[in-house]
């Protein structure tokens, strides 16, 4: 069994914040690797790019802060960064939803998504990535 308590995760997030600022807006820490899934902690101080994972579903548990999640539509300027992984500068024709601490977001494999932060916003979230194929 693995247990990550909120206080412990937020203490790790405080350590990730300077990295996120220095490394282009985001930093993460892998927490556990398992047969068909893994967990990580993510901290953002800036918006992300458009992403599409063909073989992995994402579930985000928002621990602190808030952002807008953009899902669906199509990647703008898509390019492959690894097998089954595409990135783009943005997403067009997508739905937008506001998320905040306490929310849980599930993004199925194959669904383009992007996290947009407003001026001065930060967000910390626990990520569960589950392999679909």
Image (cartoon, rainbow, N blue to C red):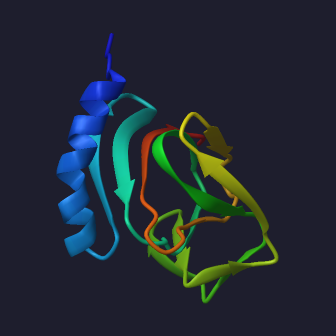
Looking at this view, is 17 or 93 the one in front? 17
Task: Answer with the quarter of the image where residue 77 lies.
Answer: bottom right
Looking at this view, is 93 or 132 the one in front? 93
Position of residue 125 measured from the top left corner of the image (x, y, whole percent): 44, 44
Examine the rendered structure and indicate whether residue 107 appears above or below residue 11: below
Q: Is residue 46 left or right of residue 14?
A: right
Looking at this view, is 115 or 52 the one in front? 115
Position of residue 56 measured from the top left corner of the image (x, y, whole percent): 55, 48
- Look at 39% across and 28% down and name the residue there: 35
Examine the rendered structure and indicate whether residue 21 appears above or below residue 108: below
Position of residue 126 measured from the top left corner of the image (x, y, whole percent): 43, 39
The residue sitting at the bottom extreme is 77
Position of residue 89 measured from the top left corner of the image (x, y, whole percent): 55, 85
Q: Is residue 31 visible?
A: no
- Look at 57% across and 33% down and name the residue there: 102
- Look at 67% across and 65% down and name the residue there: 112
Looking at this view, is 128 or 100 the one in front? 100
């Amino acid at each position: 069994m693995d247990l990550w308590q909120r206080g412990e995760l937020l203490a790790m997030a405080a350590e990730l914040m300077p990295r996120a600022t220095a490394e282009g807006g985001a930093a993460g820490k892998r927490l556990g690797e398992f047969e068909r899934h893994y967990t990580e902690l993510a901290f953002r101080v800036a918006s992300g790019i458009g992403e599409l994972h063909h073989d992995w579903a994402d579930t985000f548990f928002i621990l602190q802060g808030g952002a807008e999640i953009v899902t669906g539509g199509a990647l703008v300027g898509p390019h492959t960064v690894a097998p089954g992984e595409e990135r783009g500068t943005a997403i067009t024709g997508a739905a937008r939803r506001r998320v905040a601490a306490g929310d849980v977001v599930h993004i199925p494999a194959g669904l383009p998504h992007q996290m947009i932060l407003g001026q001065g916003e930060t967000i910390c979230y626990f990520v569960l990535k589950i392999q679909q194929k």
